[in-house]
Image (cartoon, rainbow, N blue to C red):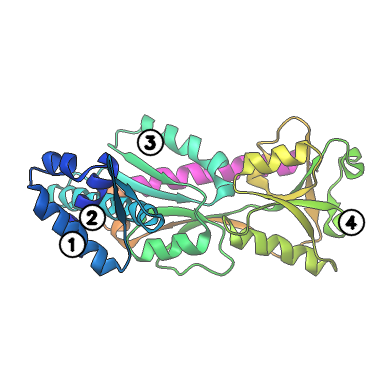
Amino acid sequence: MELRHLRYFVTVAELGSISRAAAKLYIAQPPLSAQIRQLEEEVGAALLVRWSRGVRLTPAGSSFLDDARAILARAEQATQRAREFQSGERSTLRVGLVPSATQSLLPGLLRRFVASNLSVQIEAQERVPSARQLQALRNAELDLGFVRPASVVGQSEWVCAIDDPYWVALPHGHALARSTKPIAVKALEHAVFVAFSRYAESDFFDQTASLCEGAGFKPDVRHTATQFMSVLAMVSSGLGVAIVPASCAILAQPGVAMRRLTGIARKSQLVLIANQALREDAWGRSVLQIAEQELRALEVSVRAASVAAR
């Protein structure tokens, strides 16, 4: 299978007609039809069916179209990045963020890059689990990321980290919200929980579940969301409580009370990771300096919120 097969298929699928696709691709219709049949034989599934007005996708074709578009986009990105390296004028930065760091980090990070003299085009990949970011970094699919690793990140990826303690988000009407004092995890034993989706942020989900199990109970998770603001919206609506990082707590919303959790031995951290290529050139080191500055600024806000809550 070659990239041209994918380009031919995507063009036919988008135009819904082999004749119109052939005209756009500047090739004759019979060779194009032959290329599509060759692709279907290699895939082992019918991707298109003919009808009176042209062609339409089969269920297998619809699935294959999404992947084909993604592969072509990645190939284009790879070409562009190779040209950037060749010219010494890198500009594209692929950034991964776990869901619980998107709202607290991305806006400030973007502002810092705008204010800098660096030419940076950011491709933000949000809601990427920590383990997946690490793998993408090692496969050169990401340049840097912000993760909440369940285990120690290798020194080859680690740039810096901040402590990001566990807090709890409570509906304002919740009994535990009446006190401003820190709350023990055990006090949440009979609560209904809202949580970050395990699919979207498996490390944090497992870490918070482990906190509850360490306190002697299994959390009753009835609602999940892939974004922090959605988690808070559910809490505000009274659907349950949520264990969140302190960096999320500083973004408290109306109807939500944030309280520190006590009696926790496990350390919660937000870690900046980067691939080796980014560390090895001047542009990359400048990028990392800006990213670290934003992480440190967030650390200051987290410490101030923790002091104010004592």
Question: Is disc 4 surrounded by few (<14), some (14 to 19) or many (20+) residues within 10 Å?
Answer: few
Instruction: Identify residue for label 3.
Output: 113
Amino acid type at circle 4 is His
Q: Which residue is mark 1?
A: 2
- Confirm whether the magenta stretch covers residue 101: no
What is the distance, in whole Å, between disc 1 and disc 3 at their CAs?
A: 38 Å
**Amino acid at the residue labelled 2:** Leu
- Upstream in the sequence, badge 4 or badge 2? 2
The spot of residue 165 in percent (x, y) is: 68, 53
Q: Amino acid at mark 1?
A: Glu
In this view of the protein, can residue 229 be seen by the observer? yes
Work out whether 24 lies above or below 272.
above
Name the amino acid, label 3: Phe
SS type, badge 2: helix
Of badges 3 and 2, the one in the foreground is 2
Displayed quadrant of residue 26: top left
Element at label 4: loop
- The answer to whether marks 2 and 1 mark residues whose Cβ atoms lie closer than 8 Å is yes
Report the disc number at residue 190: 4
State the residue in front, 123 or 76: 76
> Which secondary structure dominates the residues rendered in magenta?
helix
Residue found farthest to the front:
52
Question: Does residue 128 appear left or right of residue 120 in this picture?
Answer: right
The quadrant the C terminus occupies is top right
Q: x%, y% of residue 216?
A: 85, 69
Residue shown at 75% from the left, 64% from the top = 211
Which one is closest to the eye, mark 4 or mark 1?
1
| First reached walking from the N terminus: tag 4 or tag 1 | 1
